[in-house]
Image (cartoon, helix red, strand yellow):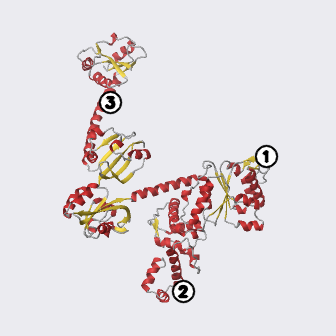
Amino acid sequence: MQKVLIVGGGVGGSAILQMLLESDFLHVSGVVDINLNAPAIQTAKKHSIQTLNSFREYEKNAVEIVFNATGSDEVQKELQKHFFNKTVIIPGSIANVLVNLLNEKEHFITRLSEQSHKQKIIFNSIEEGMVGIDQNSRIIFLNKSAARMLEVDIASSIGLHIHELISMSELPRIYETGRTELNKELQLQNGLKIVTSRFPMIDEHGETIGAFAVFQDISEVVSLAEEITDLKEVQTMLQAIIQSSDDAISVVDEKGNGLIVNPAYTRITGLQTEDVIGQPASADISEGESMHFKALKTRKPVRGVNMKVGPANREVIVNVAPIIVDNKLKGSVGVIHDTTEIRSLMKELDRARSIIRTLESKYTFDDIIGLSAEMQLSLQQAKLAAQTLVTVLLRGESGTGKELFAHAIHSASDRKFNKFVRVNCAALSEEILDSELFGYEDGAVPFVKSGEKRGLFEEANNGSIFLDEIGELSPAIQSKLLRVLQEHETLRIGGTKPIPVNVRVIASTNANMEKALLDGTFREDLYYRLNRMPILIPPLRSRKQDIPRIAERLLLKLNQEYGRKVEAITDKALGLLRVYDWPGNVRELENVISRSMIFMQMHEHVLTEEHIPLNMLKAAEAKSEVVVEASVPLQEQLDTVERAILHHALTQFKGNKTKTAKQLEISLRTLYYKLEKYGLA
């Protein structure tokens, strides 16, 4: 600790003394002033600090720092002459600055205290409980509502570990993950049921410094509904509680007619009070059945039901409980939790992941969509292959996603941190493909003037190489490839020394390899080397149930490419897409959706059947045969057949709907309904 001498005991010296008395690093060894009644002299005496009327009485090396609080330049010069050079002499101008800073400090401390007091008043005035923790999961904040719900004292709770107060608290996990959680139900140790939202606390530098929770007692709402006999009294008593809730609350009478809704209800559903009060409980539902009616019918609570409400089709989770008093049904109360924001965040997360993968030029098995038995079998085989070094042969029609599988196998293997090289064997001439795959020595290739080149097998060493359209290889390159697979070495064009390589080969083809073997255009020994782990990827027409999910993923991808915000595809449009057999598979589906998005206006966010270019699906309309597919649901196949019949009849009668209805022996009204259903109107 460094010793300090203060010269000048006036206001400035007194302020500096007060500051240094609070310091853990500087020790005031003396105060000097010719006036022994100066303020700093009096303060120094109270703290047993030496006081003198002349600094010359101090030895030259007795102190390390001297504060000249007199403001005199003459004193400054004398101080510099008296003390050694190693002693720091702080002049009066700087001392004045320090005094001003001290005054500002006191001012800001006072303002900060006032603001802190106001914040405490606000936090302690709200109905919701609030609790906050620091990095060590210690409680740093607890408002009165939280203390009341937890039945604890605020002063004795500060500094405790959060699990000592709430054993099932998830706040430490929120701090670790930095994620927000909204509207989670929790039962406290005292039996109180609450709905809580948890948030990380992030400072101005983006660092997570803690976490806090806001929670509300919902058991009180249910308890009041069960105990009050008069529904009007229930309305009066519940009004003050539900008005402050961030979750939507609705109450209906024993007939299922709306009785009470809170502001959060109108915000979430988009319906005004007059649209609901006095109306049946189903008035707010856009998809699903009324849980109020179900609770009234069964006299039992209904919890955790997903449904859509309001004109905006808001996705919510609904909890409903019947109001039973003296074994008499008086109505029901429902609490609606909004999940739209959570789903929106999940979509944003998927979008971010998709962007990252695009930048990395690779995919994983999570990017492959397929629920059909054939696709699931292919995925299982690919995941098994990823765990070994076996050569893989991907077989399937063009556009089925063979390259996607190749990326996913590499990403799931032990080689995922090494290079993944893709080669389209059909896109390059034999000479260029030979030089690209195996490289060449200086002067060995006629169309290259000078220099040597490493081959792609060398580039992919310790990684993976994907040979697309392997069936297009010439006999000469087939022979060289066989050597790589057998001997694990490659030889450059013009070279004499083999180069060892450790490469995992993934090949693909849409050709009939067995026919190529019979025709002699593909080496039999190479085929058996490549065919160690064959994986057949099914065409899209055999797994049409995957079309909605594939279309949703394609929307995400194309939105990024085109800068659009298309959010969904209508059921009618999806029905139109299911009818087609997709000879070009997923690649053709992406092309159709891409063209459809181009036809949309910038303000449109939903892709409908009107946007789909029907001329691209003309081949499907011309088909007269019915293909029965066991993997496609019966109703979907029946819809396909019915649509084809309607289209054929309309074409036969040149669009005359009256003749078409008469020919099919159905009413004109039924015909219009079906035409609208299948997008033929």
Q: Which residue is mark 2?
A: 652
**Element assignment for label 3:** helix
Q: Amino acid at mark 3?
A: Leu
At a point 47% along the width and 64% down the height, the residue shown is 566
**Res. 428 image quadrant:** bottom right
Tell me which numbered mark, 1 or 2, is placed earlier along the sequence. 1
Q: How would you rate the neighbour count of disc 2 (Cα within 10 Å): few for under 14, some for 14-19, many for 20 or more?
A: few
Classify residue 302 as left or right of residue 435.
left
- Asked if residue 242 can be seen in this view, the reply is no
Residue 267: mark in rendering: none
Depth check: 469 or 591 in front?
469
Tell me which numbered mark, 3 or 1, is placed earlier along the sequence. 3
Q: Residue furthest front?
A: 327
At a point 61% along the width and 51% down the height, the residue shown is 413
Percent across and percent down for residue 352 are 49, 54
**3D distance between C-alphas at marks 1 and 2:** 72 Å
Quadrant (top left, top right, bottom left, bottom right) of the N terminus: top left
**3D distance between C-alphas at marks 2 and 3:** 94 Å
Q: How would you rate the neighbour count of disc 3 (Cα within 10 Å): few for under 14, some for 14-19, many for 20 or more?
A: few
Residue 101: mark in rendering: 3
Q: Amino acid at mark 2?
A: Gln
At a point 58% along the width and 68% down the height, the residue shown is 540
Percent across and percent down for residue 94 are 35, 25
Percent across and percent down for residue 574 are 49, 70
Depth check: 120 or 94 in front?
120
**Res. 398 image quadrant:** bottom right
Q: Amino acid at mark 1?
A: Lys
Residue 497: mark in rendering: 1
Question: Which mark's residue is nearer the viewer, 3 or 1?
Answer: 1
